[in-house]
Amino acid sequence: MRGRYGASRALVRQTLAELLACEPLAVPLHSPPGEPPRLAPGSGWISLAHSGDRLLIGWSSQPIGVDLENRHRPLQAAALAKRFFPPQECRQLAGLDPAALRRAVLESWVHKEAAIKWSGGSLAADLGHWCWDHRRQVLLNLCGSAAPTSYIKECQGWLCAAAGEEVELVEWG
């Protein structure tokens, strides 16, 4: 984990240095292990997602959350949905064939995890408060709080999601 942490922070500094027009070591990144990374006021917002050997970096002038999962990740989709998804979402998933259910659960998961990062929440505490409406393709916060726009893209077998203002304008690279 220590190696992955160091490598990811070096990549973040290198990437943001280009955006912020400074040297990598001058990037105002505050990123203690085990905490979400933050940038100094006026430098924007950042969100990171790790999965396997992949790193997704999200940066915006507004709060942002990102997540990624391998589209081929093995999982027990029905059990995962039953345990973590709200009843209204489970009803939408009922009757899907196994492949479609697996894809729908993965897509929902990355939308929700990106939204939780956007809101500064915790996956363990907040996952059940989010619902991906599969019919309308919109993220809902079941606690009545605002929900961000959420966008998903598949890239080289990975599902990548971003949540926040204007994420539909994201440049994927």
Image: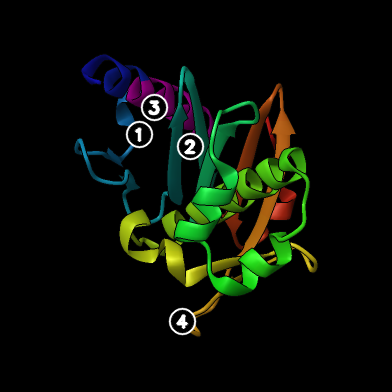
- Mark 3 and mark 4 residues within 8 Å of each other at the beta carbon: no
Regarding residue 123, the answer to whether it shows in the image is yes
Regarding residue 115, the answer to whether it shows in the image is no
Picture disc at residue 158 = none
Q: Which residue is mark 4?
A: 143
Residue at 62 percent across and 65 percent down: it is 90
- Mark 1 and mark 3 residues within 8 Å of each other at the beta carbon: yes
Q: Residues within 10 Å of mark 2 (few under 14, many from 20)?
A: some
Amino acid type shown at disc 4: Cys
Amino acid type shown at disc 1: Val
Residue at 29 percent across and 24 percent down: it is 5
Q: Which residue is mark 1?
A: 27
Residue sitting nearer the eye, 2 or 169: 2
Q: Which residue is mark 2?
A: 20
Please report whichever mark, 1 or 3, sits nearer to the chain's N-terminal start. 3
Amino acid type shown at disc 2: Leu
Residue sitting nearer the eye, 20 or 90: 90
Q: Nearer the viewer, mark 4 or mark 1?
A: 4
Q: Which residue is mark 3?
A: 13
- Find residue 32 and report its horizontal and vertical position in percent: 19, 38
Residue at 69 percent across and 24 percent down: it is 157
Q: Secondary structure at mark 2?
A: helix
**What's the CA distance linking mark 2 and mark 1?**
8 Å
Over which residues does the magenta segment extend?
Answer: 8-22
* Left or right, residue 154 beside residue 148: right
Please report whichever mark, 3 or 4, sits nearer to the chain's N-terminal start. 3
Amino acid type shown at disc 3: Arg
Q: Secondary structure at mark 1?
A: loop
Snapshot quadrant of residue 136: bottom right
**What's the CA distance linking mark 1 and mark 3?**
6 Å
